[in-house]
């Protein structure tokens, strides 16, 4: 007993040291400025996400589902809607104008001058505003070379292959920055570029001049292009995930057969570049992955834009928005994926936005609403995707996240956490001819 008692002072001393060091540790941690700043940032980001989620949940069904569509539009002078909300339930002549979340411009939407194009895009924004719809983002395919919708409007933009042959990555950055400033002046927010696929024998015929070339070239030149556009307010959409072969997906479904250990080869350019880009576009390719026994993994035996395996891989690369390629491509319908089937398969697999070359989307959007009404998990996928689109529109300046004063929000008054609300931006800048010309002249100077 006496021996046990002799150890007690030492035990008490150790306990005292432990508790005093713990108190010191937690008190230091509590007052650590960096830790407090991180905590404040996390709370702020959580509040922003909650505001976006609340806003998305409160949208009427027609506007909510419309956010998931990037659709070609009518006209080149004044915007003309082509559908009504009744199309969602099979009553095409009833209701208000049904307006997509994003408007995709093709060559026939391009007027004769920059002033006319800017006026047409402004007419889109005004129509949405007048009909109390969320402002759309305006997108275009402006890769350069023969994929160049603005060839008669903006400064010369050669193909990605020629950019890599003629310019350094630093010069490429300046070239694309000049192009980005011109797009921004016109009122465009998104460019469906660049192609980040590495050129190989298996895809050379299809890609032609649309790739920068080798992996090293793709990584350096794509990084320059993405940075140039994103820094100047134009979202980039890297494509086509996970790749292509020499079959044109407009006429047939391309196929790739690979082993599990080959997957990383296809993913490398996307995993290196996705986090810097606003979005990623899925290919229609059937990219089958075989396991060690040579058996095809079931989730890869379908077009990539409907494959949970490949969409999860795209998400892991760090992608923001995930777009499908055009679901009205005839090759899909010919292989068991007509539009009403394709649109459900894409959203169910994790795609956020459906791209359509057609001008109407009400019927396929109605298919999504019908499934969401009877499938809670599917309804949640729609909600999650709408939140991603809303977050992008905030980033693009089409919507604003306004911090609320404590007096404006009952919950905020009872909590130290910040509170936000989403507001439609009323900002509709006029076309700046001088700024456009300066960017045009800078873009042309690279060819002197």
Image (tube, helix red, strand yellow):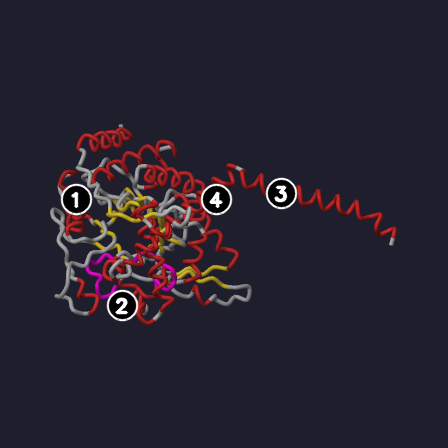
**Residue denoted by label 4:** 39
- Residue topped by disc 3: 23
Question: What separation in Å lies between label 3 and label 1 (alpha carbons)?
Answer: 61 Å
* Mark in front: 2 vs 3: 3
Label located before the other in sequence (4 or 2):
4
Is residue 209 in sight in this rendering? Answer: no
Disc 2 to disc 3, how far (Cα)? Answer: 59 Å
Which of disc 3 and disc 2 is earlier in sequence?
A: 3
Q: Is residue 346 above or below residue 119?
A: below
- Residue 36, placed above or below residue 353: above
**Mark 1 or 4, which is nearer the eye?**
4
Q: Is residue 342 magenta?
A: no
Q: Is 289 situated above or below 176?
A: below
Residue contact between numbered discs 1 and 4, judged by CB atoms under 8 Å: no
Separation of marks 1 and 4 at Cα, in angstroms: 41 Å
- Pointer 4: residues within 10 angstroms few (<14), some, or many (20+)? few
Disc 3: CA contacts within 10 A as few (<14), some (14-19) or many (>=20): few
Q: Element type at marker 4?
A: helix
**Where is residue 277 drawn, in percent x and y?**
37, 45
Task: Give the extent of the magenta segment.
Answer: 346-370
**Rounded to the nearest whole Å, what is the CA distance between mark 1 and mark 2?**
31 Å
- Left or right: 251 in relation to 259: left
Q: Are marks 1 and 2 in contact (CB under 8 Å)?
A: no
Q: Dot 2 lies on which element?
A: helix
Q: What residue do we see at 32% from left, 66% from top?
A: 344
Front residue (pair 100, 32) = 32
What residue does disc 2 label? 367
Quadrant position of the C terminus in the picture: top left
Give the crowd class for mark 2: few <14, some 14-19, many >=20 residues within 10 Å: some
Q: Which residue is mark 1?
A: 122
Q: Quadrant of residue 236?
A: top left
407 horizontally vs 218: left or right: left
């Amino acid at each position: 007993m006496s021996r046990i008692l002799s150890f007690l002072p030492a035990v008490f001393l150790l306990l005292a040291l432990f508790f005093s060091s713990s108190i010191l540790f937690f008190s230091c941690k509590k007052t650590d400025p960096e830790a407090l700043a991180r905590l404040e940032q996390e709370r702020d980001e959580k509040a922003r996400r909650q505001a976006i989620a609340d806003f998305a949940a409160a949208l009427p069904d027609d506007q909510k589902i419309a956010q998931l569509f990037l659709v070609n539009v009518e006209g080149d002078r004044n915007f003309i809607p082509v559908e009504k909300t009744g199309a969602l339930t099979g009553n095409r002549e009833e209701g208000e104008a049904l307006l997509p979340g994003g408007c995709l411009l093709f060559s026939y939407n391009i007027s004769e001058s920059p002033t006319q194009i800017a006026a047409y895009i402004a007419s889109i924004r005004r129509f949405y505003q007048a009909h109390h719809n969320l402002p759309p983002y305006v997108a275009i395919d402006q890769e350069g070379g023969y994929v160049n919708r603005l060839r008669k409007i903006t400064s010369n933009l050669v193909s990605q292959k020629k950019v890599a042959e003629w310019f350094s990555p630093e010069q490429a950055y300046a070239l694309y920055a000049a192009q980005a400033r011109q797009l921004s002046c016109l009122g465009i927010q998104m460019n469906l570029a660049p192609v980040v696929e590495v050129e190989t024998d298996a895809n050379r015929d299809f890609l032609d001049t649309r790739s920068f070339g080798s992996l090293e070239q793709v990584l350096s030149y794509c990084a320059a292009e993405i940075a140039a556009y994103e820094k100047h307010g134009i979202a980039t959409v890297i494509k086509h995930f996970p790749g292509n072969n020499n079959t044109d997906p407009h006429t047939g479904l391309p196929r790739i057969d690979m082993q599990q250990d080959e997957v990383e080869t296809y993913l490398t350019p996307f995993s290196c570049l996705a986090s810097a880009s606003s979005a990623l576009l899925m290919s229609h390719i059937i990219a089958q992955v075989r396991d060690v026994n040579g058996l095809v993994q079931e989730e890869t035996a379908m077009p990539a834009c409907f494959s949970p395996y490949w969409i999860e891989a795209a998400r892991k690369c760090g992608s923001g928005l995930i777009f499908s390629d055009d679901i009205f491509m005839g090759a899909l319908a010919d292989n068991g994926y007509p539009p009403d089937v394709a649109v459900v398969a894409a959203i169910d697999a994790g795609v956020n936005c459906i791209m359509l070359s057609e001008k109407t989307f009400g019927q396929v959007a109605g298919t999504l609403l019908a499934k969401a009404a009877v499938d809670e998990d599917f309804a949640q996928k729609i909600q999650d995707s709408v939140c991603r689109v809303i977050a992008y529109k905030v980033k693009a300046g089409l919507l604003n996240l306004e911090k609320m004063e404590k007096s404006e929000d009952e919950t905020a008054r009872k909590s130290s956490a910040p509170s936000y609300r989403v507001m439609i931006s009323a900002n509709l800048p006029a076309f700046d001819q001088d700024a456009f010309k300066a960017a045009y002249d800078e873009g042309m100077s690279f060819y002197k």
